[in-house]
Image (cartoon, rainbow, N blue to C red):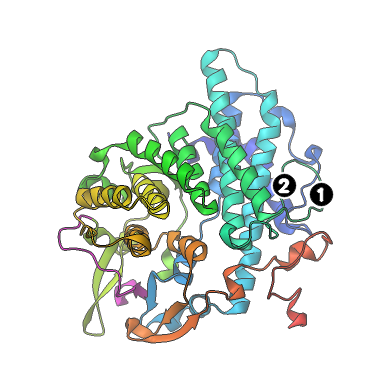
Amino acid sequence: MKPLQYISSRCHVLVAVLSCSMLVLCGSCSIDIAPADQYSDPAAITTVAAGRSMLSSVYASYPHYELQLSLLADDYCPTSLQGQDATLARFYNWDENAISDFSETAWQAYYSTIASCNTLLERAGGIQTANESEQQEKSYIVAEATALKAMGYFDLLRLFAPAYTAGADSAGIPLKEHLALEYLGRSSVRACTDTIVSLLTRAAAVTHDTKSNGWLSQTACRYLLAEVYLYKGDWAQAAALARQVIDAGGDGRFTASAYTQLWSTGQSAQRIFAFNTDQTYYTEVLANPVTDGDLYMLNPQLTYADGDIRRTLNVNAMDMQGTTRNLMGKYAGMIHEETTPTYVNRMRYAGAYFIAAEAYSRLGQDDEARSLVNHFLTLVGGTAIPETVTGTALTDSILHEKQLEFAGEGTRYFDLKRTRKAGLPRLARWGSSVSSTIDAGDHRWTWPIPRSEYLYNENVTQNEGWPLSRQDK
């Protein structure tokens, strides 16, 4: 059963979550949470069914900015229709005001989800169970809510704080652990990462596998832990956890059918976890009318081998102004085919290969890294990395292959921020030239703390390079 299918069965629980979200969105401080007695009656969450219902609402509230992050990265370049959406154009060009405005939206949305997780986790102790099956389901609910909270922290940290390897002792994000009205300061990046690891370790300790792509399983928790260890530069832990995920998957998941199902409305064997969605998704990149093409196309440097089973899914070839252009497939391709996406992919077995391969490469284990990534490329029909590619060049090749796999899914931005050594080109129309470059040390890589947070919270500091208000410019 999909998570959204639980919502209607416990409307009063959904009200509790929506009340939490409204308090976050409308309050003076984006992470100020009203006392628990201002939520709906705590007695509303006393059964496993009610707990699962509320959890499904939390899943549904999680924000999705894959398109925006892909525009900030180098997955896209503009087409002649870029001017149809001035907001996206400003975002693509790293306009400071556009990023600042969007940071307000993202900050509120992530902390709203975290507040909802805290609500459920504090209420979970009151859930009554009648048998072993219900007790097990209760443990699943707690583990999933814990993992979802960790995921929210992780996304916030990667957006609003410096990369771990660039400043582990720099200011991170406020850690909102309880339901209470608090004005919290920013914990360090190191402390935030340690908290995320602790939450995920607890969640991953619960044996929980599911046939549905829409719930966070034990495998999903291990995958997310591997990502966090990669983020903090703990290559050995990242590789070990990613190998566990790879072993849990198996080669049989890398078929043309499984990839096709990633960009369809059904379950996919290639998917570890995806959010269900019943909202319009990824439509901003499409032109009006849709038959004219897209506002942005795939970066011309992203090309796939003729036999690569991902080619027809990741690339949507369309005629624009008399020339065939490689537009983004995936979600946008589904909409062009008049299919509405019902999943937002978050974790895939393919990602575990790249986490492990990069970790091995950074450990100096070139043969292991190359063997692993080439095994994956063989499975999907890609072009193997030659044995002559070693050291830093091998790491860069692995990251490039990862971009080919996850183009348009927001993954590349986080990898660039974590690993950047050079400037990020902003391409001109059709990718014909470089119009500008975002320096590796540019302050815009770390988003600003929103005005709604620091206006009333004297304990929160602003990130370097950003003013405390527009008037301070």
Name the amino acid type tagged 1: Glu
Q: Which residue is mark 1?
A: 182
Q: Position of residue 302 (x, y in %)?
A: 30, 69
Which residue has dot 2 on it?
176
In this picture, residue 127 sits left or right of residue 353 = right
Secondary structure beneath dot 2 equals: loop
Q: Which mark is residue 419?
A: none
- Tell me the kind of residue under disc 2: Lys
Along the line of sight, the residue nearer the viewer: 177 or 98: 177
Q: Quadrant of the N terminus?
A: top left
Task: Name the chief secondary structure element in magenta.
Answer: loop
In screen coordinates, is 189 left or right of 292? right
As drawn, 342 above or below 202 = below
Give the secondary structure at mark 1.
loop
* Residue bounds of the magenta highlight: 288-309
305 is within the stretch colored magenta: yes
